[in-house]
Amino acid sequence: MPSFKAKLQETDRRLTCHFCTIPSAIVTQAIVAEGADGVIIDQEHGAIDLASLHAMIAATAGTDCAPLVRVVEATDANVKRALDLGAEGICFPMLRTPDDVRKAVATLRYPPNGTRGFGPFIAQSRWQTSVQDYRAQIEPHLVCILLIETLEAVENIEEICEIEGIDMIIPAQFDLSTAMGCSGEFDNPDLMAAVARIREAANAKSIPLGQVALSEEQAKKYLASGYRMIAGFDAVWLRVKAAEAQSWLKP
């Protein structure tokens, strides 16, 4: 049964959840084998089609790793297809307003509480349930993660955090810094102030925070600041290790 939401409810628990941009069940399986709590299969920036998405979700079966999906856009169609392939939750990009967030939350739920169409014919096998039992057994455990990466979302963050159904917030510094005109300058005072505002709003409503860390030093800094989940990128980890191997050839 799904477990990521339950882990988030353990307030002293730290989690790992890596973004998978490479369309490969083998890569996903390798990350899962090392004990990741979740994988965020990236259809927004990755090269992942529906067949690869299903294979990558299936690669987590029988493990304690949650298959989550970053959709291209927060629409009923995108969310429905990911969940119907067996995803445990959705990571929503580019939300701007409280209404955007309410609509995103609704895509995870069946009527009358939401807008999701019914058809878990593949998801039933991933979760070892039946079509009839899927809703009662799985829907309450589905995870909603928000990427806060627009200026509008920062301005609306206090109201956004009031909305029921948000399980985690990730201040997306790459997109947010780009939107602020300081792309990649993570120590820019304006960006740091925006991230602090996001963090304070989330903490006020006890919403767990996640962040991307590309080194142990970064991870420890975020964890010490109260972040609960640390993420990385499969393609970045691969390139780092390849560069390390190249360095072995130097005299």
Image (cartoon, grey):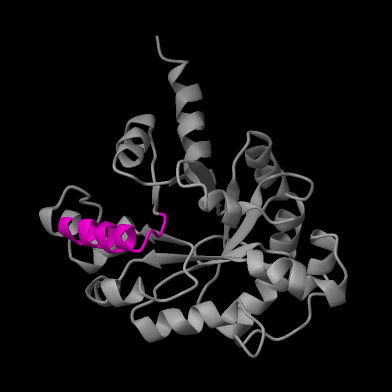
Task: Specify the quadrant of the image occupied by residue 114.
Answer: bottom right
Q: Main secondary structure of the magenta part?
A: helix
Determine the residue located farthest toward the top in the rendered image. Answer: 251
Residue 166 vs residue 84, the one in the foreground: 166
Residue 135 screen position, x and y as percent: 75, 75
Q: Say whether residue 237 is left or right of residue 202.
A: right
Query: Which residue corresponds to the image point at 63% horizontal and 33% vertical from the top-left?
Result: 34
Q: Note whether 125 is above or below 110 in the view shown.
A: above
Residue 133 screen position, x and y as percent: 83, 72
Is 130 colored magenta in this rendering? no
Residue 247 vs residue 39, the one in the foreground: 39
Task: Specify the quadrant of the image occupied by residue 180.
Answer: bottom left
Residue 237 vs residue 172, the one in the foreground: 172
Q: Say whether residue 156 is left or right of residue 13.
A: left
Q: Say whether residue 193 is left or right of residue 172.
A: left
Query: Which residue corresponds to the image point at 42% horizontal and 55% vertical from the top-left?
Result: 208
Residue 35 screen position, x and y as percent: 63, 36
Q: Note whether 102 is above or below 2 in the view shown.
A: below
Q: Quadrant for the N terminus, please.
A: bottom right
Residue 28 visible in the picture: yes
Q: Which residues are magenta?
A: 193-208
Residue 52 screen position, x and y as percent: 71, 60
- Give the number of callouts: 0
Query: Which residue corresponds to the image point at 59% horizontal and 63% vertical from the top-left?
Result: 69
Is 201 colored magenta in this rendering? yes
Query: Which residue corresponds to the image point at 47% horizontal and 15% vertical from the top-left?
Result: 249
